[in-house]
Structure formats: structure tokens, C-alpha cells
Image (spheres, rainbow, N blue to C red):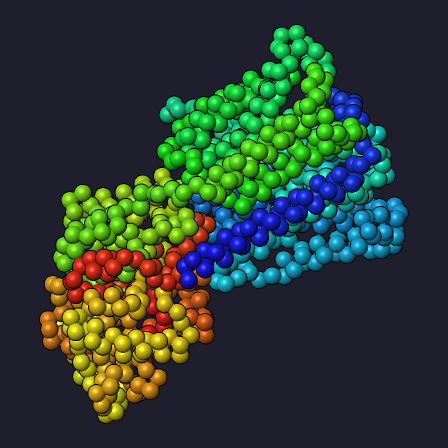
Amino acid sequence: MRGLVGLIERRRRLVTLGVVLAVIALGFAALDALTHEIRYSQVRAAVHALTPAQIVLALGFTAASYLALTFYDYLALRIVGRPLPWRTAALASFTSYTLSHNLGLSLLTGGSARYRIYVAAGLDGPDVARVVALAAGNFWAGIITIAGAAMLLHPGRLDLPGVSLGAGPTHLAGAAMMAFMAALVIAAARAKGPLRVLGISLPVPRPGQIMAQIGIGFVDLSCAAAALFVLLPGAAPALLPAFVLAYALGIVVALISHVPGGLGVFEAVVLAIVPGDRTALFAALIAYRLVYYLLPLVLAALLLAWHESRRSRRLAQLVGGMQTLATSLSPLLLSCSAFLGGGMLLLSGSLPAIHARMGLLADFLPLPFIEASHIAASLVGTALLLLAPGLYRRLDGACLATRLLLVAGAFFSLTKGIDYEEAAACLGLAGLLQLTRGAFYRRTALTETPLTAGWLAAVGMVGGLALWAGMFAYRHIPYDDDLWWKFALQANAPRYLRAALACAVFLAGFALWRLFAPSASRPHGESVEEAGPAIRAIMATSGRTEAMLALTGDKRFLVSAARDAFIMYQVKGSSWVVMGDPVGAEQSWGELLWAIRDLSHRQQGRLMLYEVSPAALDLAIGMGLQIVKYGEEAIVDLPAFELGTPQLRSVRKSERVAAKAGATLRVVPAGAVPVILDELEAISAEWMAAKGHREKGFSLGSFEREYLCNFDVALVMVEGRIVAFANLWLTRDKAEASVDLMRHRADAPRGTMDFLFANLLVWAKARGYRRFTLGQVPLSGIDGRHLAPAWAKAAALVFRHGESFYGFRGLRGYKEKFAPRWEPRYVAGPHGIGLIQGLHDVSRLIGSGPAAGPAAVRHAAQVSVSFPVHTRPLERMLPA
């Protein structure tokens, strides 16, 4: 089953990657069709024809647009009641929008930058989510408003791709958009209290705030569109409505397509809608990419690198913690910059060199060296694309290799065509990486850097852009076989073909190497064979039945230096999930938890402490983890337990019903369990089929013969026939008792489970055990009051109203019959989205079922101990 889940997940990622690459290909195909009549020389002449006044105006409108962007967050923070200084909101807005504009995937790129900045400023995850939602509302309000205004002002017929609207329908559509925005303002004025979605409150802006949001969005998009409009030579005011509509539609299509930066898609939409000279428009779009997208990214990288390089305490006090922010954001920005630097080298290798510079270069260097430099520069660019994920993951090797490649790229840029602009960019980026090298501290092999679907799509996009750019530049040159072997100073097309082939071979070789390379063995602690004697000894001294989860065969172990404690864990996705508290001497808990935190961090993973008790909270808080209450565990104190008390009246009644039907309790010692395994397996299979369940793993046991042979088994017998069973988890010091698997036949008498529990409690008390655990109830005991955090409100909502889906209230009600006391259990993990991703990995880990571990795992200790985990299905705890 685990292999099937992994296969489905891999196929899902491949399908996602295929869809994105198909959209990229369609975008470039549309762009090629729209520029079919345009020549590269014409576009270059149009770019050179841009006047300084146009460039200055475009820069001014770009600055105004980004300034307006800062007020998205500034206003949203006030709406959610968490106002921050403008400079903090400005940093978050500028950084996040710079990243999302260039990379796309705004939630993962820009959202990540926002989260780090705002959490450092004192906000929690739900507040950041509200700010992001309101900022997105700002953007869409601006899009709708500006599109509606443009349609209202359009003087006549509007021609869109495949659709032609007359003046009447155009004005009607514009009026409808404006009416929709007016209706929003009126609805906000009449709204009473915040919107509540799944127990989470989303504040409704006041009418004045909505008007301010609309105004900010309108100014932002108007300035962004104007930055492109002023680059058009002789743009007439009559063109403005169609141009604004084209710009708005291009932005929306680029966002929906999820193409990184909307590259190719945005340009194709604008070229298709805006009438007039496409050569001038295409040149303006190229200049606009540089002014509105790349220049702000360079500025953001410079600002963060400057903050990272300043180490004085006085400056740290002046900038109010900017040093920490710079350290956390530098890898994200610089990985993006390195990726774009690689794209720059690839694109340069696809375009003709400047004629005058090549003549000057020929006076100093021989032609073979120039040819080799051209190919080498393209290969350096391709390598930078592949190293960028390593920078994002803070790998020291990636930082070093990228710096070396950037220096080499600068050298080859000069020796292939005296491209000093590219050389300066490469050297500048290498200098920034040198200044920020302290942020890249993980000593992980580059060969283990994962290339996600997003990175692969981005590599495909840049490769496709470089290939299309060369085909566009040399489309007028007839192709023949001799073209590959033509070597001349001005033979740009053959040089492009050879460089493209070299890059394709390099990428293909890299893909094959990653595909056929053996899986890297990560230091995942010790196996049970390596730590078997220590685990056996530690489990024998443990007073918690939780320790017996070490026998399930699906975990790895870290053992303390003193060999007096261990933790059990497993890796799922990027999550390192520790099961419960450390087992053994408490003085070694800190050593173990910090060791697993360091190990997971260096392996680029996230640490999750699952089902920990209050005893581990101090350590979890000290490690900087977010603490979330997950539920409560029901514990019966056996010395005070009396079956005849009034609180247990319903239990006694059910127990007597089963007893009158002939039910008796029998406990079979572990040594005799193999004799009855066949019958137990039949009962288990019948129960699983009736409930529609499959075996789970990690946080509870499963029916495996070798596993069950470690424990005594309690049987419910009727007329000499087994109708129900449960394997017992018992500590050697008699501190705790519990059960793991609980399964019964369909024809078991009514009240069988109550009979089993009631008699086991009496049995354990008679043998001197001090407590009996009934397992945990997820989401129990979480108070979703008005001022509680969002996760608590959501948990309380699910507990109260999710009975038909989860049955948590019914589970707690059943356990309450035994009058237990309730102890809290927690989950500790990373802050924000990482915690949600970690919980998802925990769910996948439990749901993937038992692993086919070695028999030594199940026989690591012959100690009769156990622990009831709260994740067992509800049916295992309810009466038959």
C-alpha cells in the first residue's frame, strides 16, 4: 500500500508538471504565431529607439506602482486589527510582490516572504493569512474596477481574441463591473460582524476601507499599465481603453496559468488584443520586463544583501531586527536571482552578438576560443538553473558552486562577445552571494537537492524561451546540414545551434544521472538491529506503554550517548515525525530532541513531535516549535477504581448483558499466543471487512503475527469460542496497562466491548497496575472561545459539528463512561504553513499502513508493555 501511495503521488506530480509545461509550450507557440512577421533586427531597432524620456517615465510609473503595492498590506493590517509600521508593511509587500511577479506561485514565493516578515513582527499564522486574503482582494478589486472603467470609456467597438463586442455591450459590461463593486461597498456597510468560515473570522472592511482598497488597486494597476503604455512610440489616447483591457486580461491569464512570471503568456495576450504595430509593442514588452520585473528584483536582492552584510550591533538596533529578516529571506531572493542569471546567459547565447564588439574581440582571441566560450557560457547558464534549488535550501555547496560558476560566466561573457553588461551582472550576483554566505550553512550534498515540479517547470520555461529566442532571431536563415559546421566570426546562427545542442545534452545527461543514480542513504539514526540491546533495556525500565510502539517495525531510532533513552521516528515527505515523548531517562530527552532537530534541519526537513505530553513541552518551546493541542488522553487511576460506583452504572449494565449471554474473560500469555493466531486472524479479517478499514501504522499496531506474539492477549469467550480479543500492553514495573488492537466477531453479544474493558480494569487492578489508559480523543478539550487562536476555533468547530464524519464527541462520550481523568496531548512543529504540511505528512504516514520491517524489530524486546494511541479508528473503542 505504501508503494501504491508513493506511485500515485509521483504520478500526480508528473501530471502537474506536464500540464504546466504544456501551457508554457502553448504560450510560446502563440507568441511565435503573433510575431511571425517580425524580425529580430526590427525588434532590436525598436528597443534602441526608446528615448530616455520614455525610460524615465516607465521607471517613475514602476516606482509609483510598487509604492501603491505597499499600501495593500498596510491597509490590510489595519483591517485585521494588527497595525504595523509602514516600513514593515512596505518590506513585506515589496519583497513578496517582487518574488511573485518574477516566479509566479504567489502563495509559495511571495506568501513565504510575507510570513517570515510578519511573524518576526509579532503576527501569527492566521493573521498573516487574513492579510494575504485582503491583499488579494485589493488586487482583484483593482482589476475589476480598472477593466470596468476602461470598458465604460471605450468609444466604440471592442475586438478581443475570438470575440467582437459592439459599443453597447461593451459599455453594459463595464457598467456591470462597476455596479458589482458598488454592491460590495453597500454589502460591507450592512454587514454585522466579521465573516465566519469554519470557525475562523475574516473581518469585513468598512465602506471607507473598501473604497480605499479599490483606490489602491486602481492606482497600482494604472501605474503598472502606464509603465508599459509610455514605452509605446506615439501611443494615442484612443488606444488606452483597449490597452488597459489587454493588460488586465494578460495579468489574469498569467495568474491562472501558473506559468512562472507569466512569461510568454502575458506577452501573447497583450499582442493579441492591442491593435497597432506589433514590432513596437513587442519591443515595449521586452523593455517592460526589464523595468517592471527584473529591476525591482535586483533592488530587493541588494537591499537584503546589504542588511545581511551589516554585522554591527548598533545598526541591528537601528534597523529593528532587519538582520534576522535578511538572513531568512536572502536564500529565497538570491536563488531567484541566480536562476534568472542562468536564464540571462542562456538567452544571450541564443541571440546574435554585437557586430562591432566581435570585430574588436577577434583582434585579441582566436576563433576556436570564442566558439568554446560561447558554448561554455550557455552551459554555465544551464548549471545555474539546476543549482538554484540548492541555494533556496541554504546548501553551502550550492553557494560555493554558484559563486564559482558566476565568475566563470562573467569570464565567458567577455570572451564570447565582450558582453560586459552580463559580466557585471554575474560578478555583482557573485559578490552578493559572498556577502550573504553565512545564510547558506547546511552541509548537505548537492546530489541530494530535490528538483520539484515547480523548479523543473521553471527550467523548462527558460530553456523554451532560449530555444524560441534563437529561432525568432534566425528564422530568416535557411537551415541545412552544413550550418552546424560553419565557423566564422559573424556566424551567429551556427553558434546558437551548437550551444543549444550542448545544453540539451547537458540537461539530458543530468536527467539520466538523477534517474539512475542510487538512492542516497541519509543518516536516519540507528536501526533496531544496531540499537537492539539498548532499546530492550530502556523499554524494560519505561513506565509508559507508549514505548511498545518501537515494536511495530516502521520506525527508526536515536539513542542517547548514555544509552539510557531513545526516540522513535520516521521520515515522510519532508517531515521528520517523532512518535510521542522520548522513552527512558528524562535527563537525556533534551539531548535526543535537539539531535533530531539538528539532523532534520540539515537534511532540509521539518520536525514534528506527535502526541507529546506536557512533560516535553518545555523542550519543544525551547526549540522554537509551535505548540498545538491535539486532544486529551483518558486515564483511569486503578487504585481508586470501583466497578460498583454510581458513575459506572451504564458500564455495569452493558457488562451484565454480555455476561448473561455467556461471555467470560481469559488472558492468554504471550508464549501461548501462536496457538490461537489462526482464529484471531479470522476475527480480525472479518472485523476489517465489516468496518471497511485497512491496517494503519506508525502510531498504533496492526495485525501481524510476529508483532502480536510479543504480548499477552485478552479474549472474550462465549461457550468456548473466541468472539473478541485485544492484545495487552503492560509495563514491567506495573505503572501502566492498556490495549492496542481490539476486534470482535459480527455475532459477538451486545455489550462485548464494555465487558472487555470493565473486566480488564478489574484484572489490572488486582495485579497491582496503577493506571489504565483508554487512548486519546482527538480535538477533545480545545476551547474555541472568541479570543482563542484560529486553530483552536477550527478544532472546536470540528469537534462540535463534525460528528457524522469523525465521531470525536461520541468517542469521548464512550470513554467518559469509565470516569477517567483527562491528560492533554500536543503536536509540536514548524510555524505557519509548515505545520499544516507536517500534519498532512503525519496523516499519510499513519495511513500508509505497516511497513514490512525485519523480524528483529518485532522481537527487539520481550517485555510485556503497551500504549493505546489516540489515532485508532472510533469503531475500535465503541461497544459491539
The residue closer to the viewer here, 91 or 802, is: 802
The image shows residue 250 at horizontal and vertical percentages of 72, 44
The residue closer to the viewer here, 229 or 212, is: 229
> In screen coordinates, is 433 left or right of 241?
left
The residue closer to the viewer here, 256 or 646, is: 256
Q: If the image is split into quadrants, where does the N terminus sit? A: bottom left
The image shows residue 811 at horizontal and vertical percentages of 35, 73
655, above or below 32, in the image = below
264, above or below 478, in the image = below
Which residue ends up furthest to the bottom in the rendered image? 660
> In screen coordinates, is 747 left or right of 457?
left
Q: How many numbered dots are placed on residues in this image?
A: 0
The image shows residue 219 at horizontal and vertical percentages of 69, 40
The residue closer to the viewer here, 291 or 38, is: 38
Residue plotted at (35% across, 84% down): 746
Picture quarter containing residue 284?
top right
Residue plotted at (83% across, 34% down): 37
Which residue ends up furthest to the front in the rendered image? 481
Any part of residue 501 in sight: yes
Q: If the image is split into quadrants, where does the C terminus sit? A: bottom left
Residue plotted at (39% across, 50% down): 575
Any part of residue 648 in sight: no
